[in-house]
Amino acid sequence: MHGYVARILLRTTFKNGVLKGLRLVSSHTHQWIQPTGYKTGIHVYNSLSKQKNELVLPKGKYLSWYGCGPTVYDSSHIGHASNYVRYDIIRRILQDFFGLNVCYMMGVTDIDDKIIKRSNELDKEFTAITSFYEREFFQEMSALNILQPSLISRVTDYIPEIVAFISRIIQRGHAYKGTDGSVYFDVARFGVYYKFIPQQEHAQADAKGKKSVEDFALWKVVKPGEPYWESPWGPGRPGWHIECSAMASRVFGSTIDIHSGGIDLMFPHHENELAQSCSYHGVPQWANYWFHTGFLYQSFDSEKMSKSLKNTISVAELLKTYTANQFRMFCMLTHYRNNIEFNSEKMAKAVSLDSKIGSFLQQCDAYVKGQIVGGNISEAETMAMLAENEESFLGHLRDDFHTPLAMEVLFDLISTVNTNLRKADADCRSPGVIAAVQLYVKTMCQKLGFQKKGLKVHDNMSQDSDSMKLREVLDNTVKFRHNVRQFALNQQLPRIDFDNQREYKKCRQNLFLPLLQECDNLRSQLSNCQIRIQDHSGFSSWEFDDTKNNAERAESDPDITGEKSNVLNSSSQGTSAKEVASKSQNDQGQQKSKLTSTDKHSSDSDRTSA
């Protein structure tokens, strides 16, 4: 597997999504295409090029990022948590230190073999299981102070897009229906594979319905007792790899700036994603930069922490002993690409360093207030040291987000200033300079995602859970209303029993008007609770809306002018990626509705005769 493998590709050209010609390359040195655009000055290790490349963004400071999210069939463990904390740190660095506009989309797998197996074990609908564990996952991520994704996509919401994605790959000649009824990607026909790892020698084995053991499933034929969806190839469900490609492409199109996941996803998951996405879009490069985190393991176990290996510690268990700040510090002390060894000694170090920051900030505060009399502080030297520290700190962050070295620099500053504060020299006080140092340290820590001292996020987990449950109830309520509304607006009656069009319309109105009136009533009732429902082409959305409160406050308080309403988007956590994509296509005039209202505030009941 690790030997040098050369593959003969004489000349590579993409034409209509089909590879033409060959040229000599090795599987170690895939020809990576450097993007053109805004040069960020940040150098990142790219798993595709196997080296550090400057992060260049084609759309200015806008950065698109797709991250593989959880498979929601069980509770998350700290191995998962370390992955998401590390990417949260990187996201915060890009946004808050370097001013990039990061659109981070997370894919949630809510249908696969493990979910079906768990559903059968518990004798529950798979949707009940995935809904519970997805809610728990985001609750725990919130407890770890991980930013919510900008967009969330769930596989079961994207079945039509996945079917269309597979259909185009088949049209390009890169997929086929196997003898078992499933649809497979044809690796040999596509011709460009093993971009992340050297080519492997496969032992002779039964391909089980496909042409080659290398080929992978795009659509799995249904088995008895499994949930399924209809498709041109028969009832079934998506393969694991196709979901990410279809969902990310639906939102971001043919190019993504960053694609990320754990090191265990590099092959075959990301290899397969890359192949099928390049086939679908007809491009030689889909995601420009690929990030992979190392895995977490315990000292007594060299294997990664995994549910299947039953060697896990749950996030809930972790937060009974440690705070979110302490676990974040633990993650920052190892470079994100390296594996992390979890043990009590390393956590004790993280606890100590986190405490050191808190003590230092309190010490600075006491000095500025005059509660500490001594302190030999040279203004010029301290300000020069502060500027040098910031330059070095940011330099390490620019170098592939090297948080261990960045934190080392920060703690050097803390140690030096602490030493000077302890010197008994009351004649050389400089509270202004110490206030500047205090603000700098506090700002750096807050930008990296550390909570204010004394705030334990997990104390509020029950409150977060209630909030997420409310959103889930609203999601389901609005979805039910949308389905009822669409049925009432679009359902046709057999015309054989009507003498004329007028009689047909009258009968249809009598049948469906009550349904539409109830849809209107529900929208009005929720509006009174400051929950606004908006009907779009193909879906409905909701949002908390305190515009009315702000208007009333503005009338009673003349100092409040031009205040923006606080609108919290719908979806269990974050905005639905599918809604964003649909809105974007609607704005571009690419998607037409069967029924379009000229007044979006008009009553549905006024449209039954349409």
Image (spheres, rainbow, N blue to C red):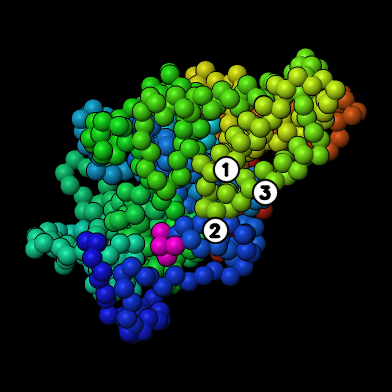
Q: On the image, numbered disc 2 is attached to which residue?
A: 43
Kind of residue at badge 2: His
Q: Which residues are magenta?
A: 47-51
Q: In the image, which disc is placed on residue 238?
A: none
Distance (Cα) linking label 2 and label 1: 15 Å
Quadrant hosting residue 110: top left
Q: In the image, which disc is placed on residue 391?
A: 3
Earlier residue among tags 2 and 1: 2
Kind of residue at badge 3: Glu
Using the image, determine if residue 128 lies above or below residue 400: above
Q: On the image, numbered disc 1 is attached to which residue?
A: 406
Kind of residue at badge 1: Ala
* Magenta-span inclusion, residue 559: no
Residue 326 drawn at (x, y percent)? 50, 27
Earlier residue among tags 3 and 1: 3
Question: Is residue 558 in view from this perspective?
Answer: yes
